[in-house]
Image: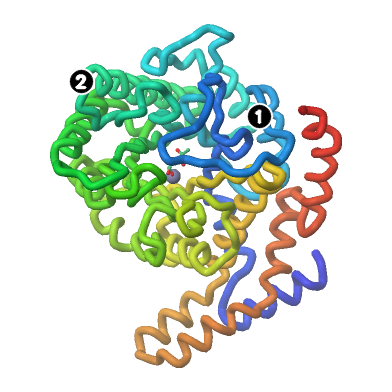
Amino acid sequence: MSKCFENAKECYASIGVDVEAAINRLNEIPVSLHCWQGDDVAGFENSGSLDGGLAVTGNYPGRARNAEELRADIAKMLTLVPGSKRLNLHAIYAETNGEKVERNELETKHFANWIEFAREQRIGLDFNPTCFAHPLAVNGTLTSADAGVRKFWIEHAAACRRIAADFGKALNNTCVTNIWIPDGSKDVLYDRLAPRQRLMDSLDEIFSEKINPKYNLDAVECKLFGIGAESCTFGSHEFYMGYAVSRGKLLCLDAGHFHPTEVISDKISSTLLYLDDILLHVSRGVRWDSDHVVCFDNELQAIASEIVRHGFEKRVHIGLDYFDASINRIAAWSIGARNMYKALLCALLEPAEMLAEAEKSGDYSTRLMLLEELKTLPFGAVWHEYCKRNNVPCGMAVMDEIKEYEKNVLSKRN
Ligand code: RNT
Ligand code: ZN
């Protein structure tokens, strides 16, 4: 153990924090890493451009062009990120052997390689129906006024739940399936009620098939606006909060899906008073974009603190959701993911007793002093040790590995 780490341990011990206990607790908190950072949310359908208000900007070379490349990149990325991990897939990552399979006809066999990969990597899988980047998604999906279109997307989501349950069974690890739809309106609307009524009915139909929660849990993701849906998004916060509470589903809170000054860290303690579990899409909103690479910033630390302060790690399913094609994608992936674990570790090193006591006794000066002093404690040494114990590189050594992989693998792809 390094001298720096020994000093850090003493330093934290002096404010009543057990560093070893924090490290052990972090090992038990899984984070679901999203597969779609590796290929700019392209998937394997060759459907052309992304839509639904999702935009991936940049054209850094080396994008994974097929399943083998994507899995190789994920495997590399996993060696750069410490801690307990899961992998989050979208339906467009199905492998159909060159055969055209409609999304409402997808089956577990189309994900056999992913199950195999998850087994090899000893990680659980999470899942998402893909209700965008498709000719039938241009005028709404689950809210569409066209019954045939609605039926297609209901069948797609229902198929995804069955596949997800198979993931859960095969890996003996509960899958979380998240539904997000881009449906909304670019301009002023006359009737906002009818599409929302249709969304409610479509969801009820999707969830009418009972699935053992041991294998699959359902989540629904709200959003305030997207590009092309500036005036209204039917799946708003109020819509899904009500839906999740009344139907016993998980609410998915994406950090980039609210008003720019609104934060999801402040929503965790409220939503968990009414819901058993929630799902997070940890991301970073910048102006109109909701999907920048996660930085180790105040909001990320606040999210992590809200989870660990109240022992919510079993009830808050942490997922990541960002995509940046302007820098090396493995770097984007691992920087964001490492930051999530870093924030959790930092939160686990808070002097819980001292802070609670200061607050309870009304000593807000001590509370503020403590919270500010924490910012300059030797956290880096603990993080370094955590990476070392997890056999992953730390500091700029991470970048050295990424550069090496870029030279040997990514640069040969174009
Ligand atoms: C879109 C949502 C959604 C997607 C992914 C690809 O705004 O955040 O979660 O980013 O499903
Ligand atoms: Zn999201």
Cβ at disc 2 under 8 Å from ligand 1: no
Label 2, residues with CA under 10 Å away: few <14, some 14-19, many ≥20: few
Q: Residue 148 or 32: which is nearer the viewer?
A: 148
Which quadrant of the rendered structure holds the N terminus?
bottom right
x and y, in percent, of residue 41 in the image: 54, 34
Q: Choose top left, top right, bottom left or bottom right for residue 193.
A: top left
User: Measured along the vertical axis of the image, is residue 253 above or below residue 414?
Assistant: below
The outermost residue toward the top is 99
- Residue identified by numbered label 2: 147
Q: Residue at x 49, y 65 (%)?
A: 299
Q: Which sits in the foreground, 413 or 405?
A: 413
Place residue 36 in its image quadrant: top right
Question: Which residue has dot 1 on it?
Answer: 70
- Kindly identify the residue that appears in the image at 58 percent across and 67 percent down: 346
Q: Position of residue 401 (x, y in %)?
A: 81, 45
Please determine whether, in this image, residue 395 is positioned above or below residue 374.
Answer: above
Image-quarter location of ligand 2: top left
* Label 2 to label 1: alpha-carbon separation: 36 Å
Q: Is residue 113 left or right of residue 191?
A: right
- How many numbered circles are shown? 2
Q: Residue at x 53, y 34 (%)?
A: 124
Q: Residue furthest front?
A: 187
| Element marked by disc 1 | helix
Q: Earlier in the sequence, mark 2 or mark 1?
A: 1
- Quadrant position of residue 407: top right
- Between label 2 and label 1, give the one nearer the viewer: 2
Q: Is mark 1 within 8 Å of ligand 1?
A: no
Task: Provide residue 168's location: percent of width, then percent of height.
Answer: 45, 28
Name which residue type carries label 1.
Leu
Kind of residue sitting beneath label 2: Ala
